[in-house]
Image (cartoon, coloured by chain):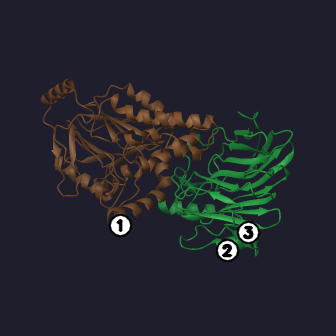
């Protein structure tokens, strides 16, 4: 009974998500879902795979599938501005992790990067697809052995999970060399980012999905990026990213979740 | 398989002083002869009587495998004049049946209680072996939620690692008696005091004291030799260990480690391990370092002190980082 409830919950949670890229509850382990995903996300556009324009760093084996650190880097030799970055985990219930649309404060003239922590539900390819100014798509991918990140309850202490929900920390870090035009930043938000696939055994009901779906980062009023997110991002979403130096290097971060709740924070003075 | 002598009472892995030896000898002389029950089959479960009527099986320092059948945590039972209580049931129905056979080699009193110290498979997956006894299954009131929400994943992983033969008969059996704060179970002539603990190793750790012998069963709040596994709160665990160090039990039984140990020394290595991780992780966070950085450096000074370090340590650091970055 318990297991059938869990399965039911899993399917119900997945079905409740009307996301464009949703492929169904669970992709079969041996099924190559990328061609379909690619078609849905980019149509017939060509993608240059592993051309060195984008680098994906993620452990080959995830120790904790609910909290896998992931970093996407754009090497310094790439001079173009960036249009967008989309991260996929092929076998996750919702394979799209996040899409970033970059604005004028994204920065150029150095290495750019974006890091977060993700849930990985199954042994899967993880992909980063970067769209450069010229409209060309570049992809880096890596296979990760990890299982049970999404269906598992990530909260080690569920009763404390919603304590302080919405608390944010935004920090900026100046470059090591004053001459570098690229700064980095960290955004943290206390949020369960629940995926609607966890069963509350006490009520025999699925814990409703509630996750951060939009984040807008601005530097001195100019857009660094807009992000669309999904529940493939781990509990207490955590981002590190770069932005371009400006006259005023303080950041404003606005976040909304799927319940329509809005959260906002400004960076602490840099270096703290 | 290692054999344990009947006098294997104090198993703290350190040199035994002359005083300790004399004390142990006196204790032995004053108590009825304690029993050692060897396994009947080559692959069976053997138990040692660490105090009158208190029997402990020492699990192996291994990951679950077809060979060990999930026999990788300590399991105990306490015999009263009326009935028997089992404390943890090993990691498969097969191993649970072997534990039951070991109990039946000692006593034919009814098995009235099956207590789980927390939700992890190596402590609860043998529960099914005791269904025939129609016992009360007892656990922390949060055990059902914790195990229930992880059941599918636990079953899948264990099916893969145990193989079909050792996985046979495993069922998720949740507590029929949920302990809110504390409860006392009467076994006849002795009682067990069960106390729920705050979030530490997990959010559903339960400790048990046998009042007749002053034996304290700590479950996985105490790891010895086997590296601790953090699935709750590092801050909560460290705080709880400070409290436990002040307890006056005659002996403690770890969830992984020797049959019996003494307070407060038994806790010292685990306190050092967790405190080292916490200190290293806090420094990395203060220096603006990332989770990835931490998984490569934090706590690695402890590597030679523990078995199975490479299997669990990075996960422990990950959990500690995610908790401590919000301080």
Residues B123 and B85: in front is B123
Marks 2 and 1, Cα distance to the nearest angstrom? 35 Å
> Contact (CB < 8 A) between labels 1 and 3?
no
**Which residue is at 39% across, 48% downward?**
B308
Among the chains pictured, the one given brown colouring is B
**Which residue is at 66% across, 59% downward?**
A55
Give the secondary structure at mark 1. Answer: helix
Marks 1 and 3, Cα distance to the nearest angstrom? 41 Å
Reading the image, the residue beneath label 1 is B164
Reading the image, the residue beneath label 2 is A36
- How many circles with numbers are drawn on the protein? 3
> Contact (CB < 8 A) between labels 2 and 1?
no
* Residue B262 vertical position relative to residue A246 in the rendered view, above or below: above
> Contact (CB < 8 A) between labels 3 and 2?
no
**Which residue is at 70% across, 52% downward?**
A114
**Residue A23: mark in rendering:** none
């Amino acid at each position: 009974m318990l297991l059938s409830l869990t399965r039911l919950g899993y399917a119900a949670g997945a079905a409740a998500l009307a996301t464009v890229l949703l492929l169904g509850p669970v992709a079969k382990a041996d099924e190559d879902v990328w061609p379909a995903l690619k078609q849905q996300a980019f149509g017939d556009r060509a993608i240059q795979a592993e051309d060195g324009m984008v680098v994906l760093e993620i452990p080959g084996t995830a120790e904790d599938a609910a909290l896998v650190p992931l970093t996407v880097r754009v090497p310094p030799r790439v001079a173009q501005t960036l249009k967008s970055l989309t991260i996929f985990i092929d076998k996750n219930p919702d394979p799209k992790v996040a899409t970033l649309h970059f604005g004028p404060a994204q920065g150029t003239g150095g290495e750019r990067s974006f890091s977060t922590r993700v849930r990985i539900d199954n042994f899967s390819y993880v992909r980063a697809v970067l769209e450069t100014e010229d409209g060309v798509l570049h992809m880096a991918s890596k296979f990760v052995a990890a299982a049970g990140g999404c269906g598992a309850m990530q909260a080690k202490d569920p009763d404390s999970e919603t304590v302080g929900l919405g608390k944010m920390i935004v920090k900026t870090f100046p470059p090591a060399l004053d001459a570098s035009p690229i700064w980095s930043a960290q955004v943290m938000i206390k949020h369960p980012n629940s995926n609607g696939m966890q069963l509350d055994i006490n009520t025999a009901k699925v814990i409703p999905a509630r996750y951060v779906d939009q984040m807008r980062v601005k530097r001195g009023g100019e857009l660094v990026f807009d992000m669309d997110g999904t529940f493939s991002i781990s509990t207490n979403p955590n981002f590190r990213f770069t932005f371009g130096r400006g006259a005023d290097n303080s950041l404003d971060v606005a976040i909304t979740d799927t319940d329509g709740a809005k959260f906002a924070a400004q960076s602490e003075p840099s270096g703290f | 398989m290692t054999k344990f002598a009947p006098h294997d009472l104090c198993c703290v892995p350190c040199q035994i002083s002359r005083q300790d030896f004399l004390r142990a000898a006196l204790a032995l002389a004053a108590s009825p002869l304690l029993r050692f029950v060897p396994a009947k089959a080559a692959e069976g479960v053997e138990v040692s009587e660490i105090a009158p009527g208190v029997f402990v099986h020492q699990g192996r320092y291994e990951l679950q495998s077809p060979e060990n059948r999930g026999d990788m945590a300590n399991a105990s039972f306490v015999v009263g004049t009326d009935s028997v209580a089992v404390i943890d049931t090993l990691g498969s129905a097969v191993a649970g049946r072997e534990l039951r056979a070991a109990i039946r080699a000692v006593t034919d009193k009814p098995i009235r209680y099956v207590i789980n110290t927390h939700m992890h498979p190596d402590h609860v997956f043998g529960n099914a072996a005791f269904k025939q006894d129609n016992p009360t299954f007892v656990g922390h009131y949060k055990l059902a939620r914790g195990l229930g929400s992880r059941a599918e994943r636990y079953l899948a992983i264990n099916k893969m690692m145990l193989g079909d033969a050792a996985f046979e008969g495993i069922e998720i059996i949740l507590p029929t008696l949920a302990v809110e704060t504390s409860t006392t179970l009467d076994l006849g002539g002795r009682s067990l005091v069960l106390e729920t603990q705050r979030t530490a190793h997990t959010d559903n750790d339960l400790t048990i004291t046998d009042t007749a012998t002053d034996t304290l069963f700590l479950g996985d709040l105490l790891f010895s030799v086997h590296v601790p596994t953090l699935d709750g709160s590092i801050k909560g665990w460290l705080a709880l260990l400070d409290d436990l160090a002040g307890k006056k039990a005659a002996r403690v039984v770890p969830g992984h480690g020797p049959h019996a140990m003494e307070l407060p020394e038994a806790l010292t290595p685990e306190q050092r391990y967790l405190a080292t991780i916490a200190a290293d992780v806090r420094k990395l966070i203060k220096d603006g370092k990332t989770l990835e950085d931490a998984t490569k450096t934090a706590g690695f000074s402890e590597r030679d002190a523990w078995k199975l370090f490479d299997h669990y340590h990075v996960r422990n650091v990950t959990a500690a980082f995610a908790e401590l970055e919000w301080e």
